[in-house]
């Protein structure tokens, strides 16, 4: 019986201008780059975006992982990890807009996604560095919120 042989490749949709030496070493830099690449504050639906990084925290790939409705989104750990593995990422940051409410507080669902990705990193070896909720009034970092507790 004949079986298919597959190849795997990334398809470049478009390019973005990001500084060569930029390091995504904190939520302020990541949210600013995320806004430039994905126009998070201008989206009419909620989206989950991912910035894949190398071991120097420099971007190696930008992905829209999921697009939802006005005030909700369903994102799959499988879809996130598939993209991170495909571009050989050392780690990734997730960015999620809250355009329905305009706020930037992390919801229980946001934290559940982040915690799921942190568990997966133990097995996959690709670090989920942060989940950042972006709203009209700024951003909230899951890593910074955990440090407060």
Image (cartoon, helix red, strand yellow):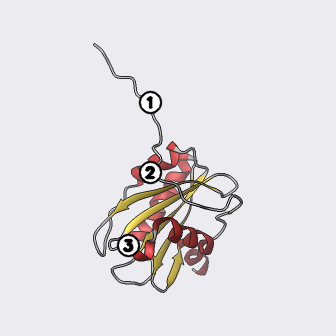
Q: Quadrant of residue 97?
A: bottom left
> Residue 140, image x and y in percent?
52, 78
- C-alpha distance separating marks 3 and 2: 18 Å
Q: Is residue 31 above or below residue 122?
A: below
Residue beneath disc 2: 13
Seen as rendered, the residue at the extreme bottom is 137
Position of 94 with respect to 99 (left or right) is: right
Quarter that holds the C terminus: bottom right
Q: Position of residue 92 (x, y in %)?
A: 55, 57
Q: Which residue bears the numbered disc 3?
A: 43
Nearer mark to the viewer, of 1 and 2: 2
Could you tell which of marks 1 and 2 lies nearer the N-terminus?
1
Observer-side mark, 3 or 2, equals 2
How far apart are the two marked residues, 1 and 3, measured between alpha carbons?
33 Å
How much space separates mark 1 and mark 2, taking CA atoms? 19 Å
User: Looking at the image, which residue is at 61% across and 62% down?
Assistant: 18
Can residue 108 be seen at all in this image of the molecule?
yes
The quarter of the rendered structure image containing the N terminus is: top left
Along the line of sight, which residue is nearer the eye, 82 or 59?
Answer: 59
Q: Which mark is residue 7?
A: 1
Circles 1 and 3: CB atoms closer than 8 Å? no
Closer to the camera, 114 or 87? 87
């Amino acid at each position: 019986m004949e079986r298919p042989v597959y190849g795997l490749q990334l398809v470049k949709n478009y390019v973005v201008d990001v500084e060569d030496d930029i390091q995504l070493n904190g939520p302020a830099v990541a949210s600013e780059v995320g806004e430039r690449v994905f126009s998070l504050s201008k989206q009419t639906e909620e989206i989950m975006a991912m910035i894949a990084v190398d071991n120097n925290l420099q971007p190696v790939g930008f992905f829209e992982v999921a697009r939802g409705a006005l005030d909700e989104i369903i994102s799959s750990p499988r879809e996130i990890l598939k993209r991170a593995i495909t571009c050989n990422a050392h780690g990734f940051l997730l960015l999620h807009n809250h355009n329905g409410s305009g706020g930037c507080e992390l919801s229980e669902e946001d934290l559940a996604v982040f915690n799921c990705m942190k568990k997966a990193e133990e097995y996959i070896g690709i670090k989920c560095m942060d989940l950042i909720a972006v709203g009209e009034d700024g951003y909230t970092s899951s890593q910074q919120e955990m440090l407060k507790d």
